[in-house]
Each structure stands twice: as structure tokens, then as C-alpha cells.
Image (cartoon, rainbow, N blue to C red):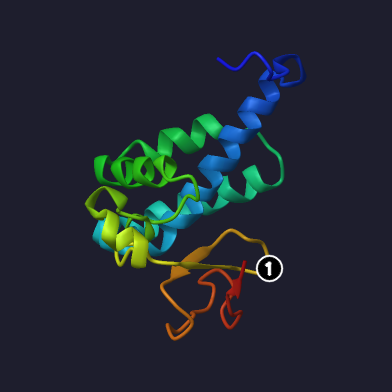
């Protein structure tokens, strides 16, 4: 443990807030992947998820409810765990795979690292999508038809 860190300035609420931010990022990142992960159940899951995200974004403490929802399905839980393990909270396909890179690849640019661009709904921020590059088409928010997602 680093003795230079002034832990007295960090409160329990600060830690919970950080956890809530991480959960918020992972939960909104999974939304475009729900049909692939849950199939026909995706719509029902999303209808439960969106109100929790809205309440969390307004500062309400719904962390336990969000964890409960995200834990109900093993595939969802595994996907969220991968996102939470990534410092930037990117979907698994946009996370670097450095363990497969060689020193030479790193020296010339690791081909397994994708510079993903995050796009978010400008209305409420409850929907996010990642794209691999500027040529990838950017969609609209499913919650606000006709509203284009904007880069972060």
C-alpha cells in the first residue's frame, strides 16, 4: 500500500459512487449487445435496465438493484465482468489483447489494439455504442428515435 495516499480524504460514499459510475458505464455499454446475448429476451431486459440507468444518472442509489439485474443471466454477467475489468469500460471486442502481441508488434503498432470511438445519446446519456473507426456508421438512440449518437 502506498503510504503517500491520503486515504482520510476518501469516504465510503466516494467508493460507492465510483462503483456506481463503473456499473453505469458497463450497463449502458451492454445495451446494443443485448439482442446478441439474450436473443428474444433482450427487449424485456432493456425495459428493466433503462429505468435503473435513469435513476442512477440522477444520483439515486440503485447499485444493488442494477447488480441484481445484471447478475440474473450468466452471459450478461460474464460480459459485464469483462467490461468492468477494462479500465476504459469498452466492450470486449474493442479491448486491447496485448497478451497476444509480440515486442515487434508493439514497436510497430499492435494490430490487436482497436482505437474505438464511444458514441452516446446526447439527450440523456443512457445509451452508448462503440465504433472501430470514423468510417463505421453511427446509429440513432433507440430511446429517442431520430436522435443521432454523438462522440464522447
Quadrant location of residue 35?
bottom left
Against 8, residue 126 (above or below) is below
- Is residue 62 in view? no
Side of 126 relative to 73 (left or right)? right
What residue sits right under mark 1 in the picture? 123
Tell me which corner region of the image, top left, top right, bottom left or bottom right, holds residue 126. Answer: bottom right
The reply to whether residue 126 is in sight is yes
Residue 52: give x, y in percent of width and height. Answer: 56, 45
The residue at 44%/55% (across/down) is: 90
Q: Nearer the viewer, residue 6 or 102?
A: 102
Task: Residue at 40% x, 64% y: name it.
Answer: 32
Residue at the right extreme, as displayed: 9
Left or right? Give the position of 109 relative to 143. Answer: left
x, y percentage for residue 137? 45, 84
119, above or below 18, in the image: below
**Residue 139: image location, x then y, percent:** 49, 79
20 over 43 or under it: above or below: above
Q: At 63% from the left edge and 43% from the top edge, which residue is drawn?
A: 56
**Left or right of 84 in this view: 18:** right
Q: How many numbered circles are shown?
A: 1
Rendered-image quadrant of the N terminus? top right
Quadrant for the C terminus, please. bottom right
Q: Picture coordinates of residue 130 (x, y %)? A: 46, 67
Element type at marker 1?
A: loop
Q: Name the residue rendered at 47%, 48% in the picture.
A: 26
Crowdedness near tag 1: few (<14), some (14–19) or many (≥20) residues, C-alpha within 10 Å: some
Amino acid at each position: 500500500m502506498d503510504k503517500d495516499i491520503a486515504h482520510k480524504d476518501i469516504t465510503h460514499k466516494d467508493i460507492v459512487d465510483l462503483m456506481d459510475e463503473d456499473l453505469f458505464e458497463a450497463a449502458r455499454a451492454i445495451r446494443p449487445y443485448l439482442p446478441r446475448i439474450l436473443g428474444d429476451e433482450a427487449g424485456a431486459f432493456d425495459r428493466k435496465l433503462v429505468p435503473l440507468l435513469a435513476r442512477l444518472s440522477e444520483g439515486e442509489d440503485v447499485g444493488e438493484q442494477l447488480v441484481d439485474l445484471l447478475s440474473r443471466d450468466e452471459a450478461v454477467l460474464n460480459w459485464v465482468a469483462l467490461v468492468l475489468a477494462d479500465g476504459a469500460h469498452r466492450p470486449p471486442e474493442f479491448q486491447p489483447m496485448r497478451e497476444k502481441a509480440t515486442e515487434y508488434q508493439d514497436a510497430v503498432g499492435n494490430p490487436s489494439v482497436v482505437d474505438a470511438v464511444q458514441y452516446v445519446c446526447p439527450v440523456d446519456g443512457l445509451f452508448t455504442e462503440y465504433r472501430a473507426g470514423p468510417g463505421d456508421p453511427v446509429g440513432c438512440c433507440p430511446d429517442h428515435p431520430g436522435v443521432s449518437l454523438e462522440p464522447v
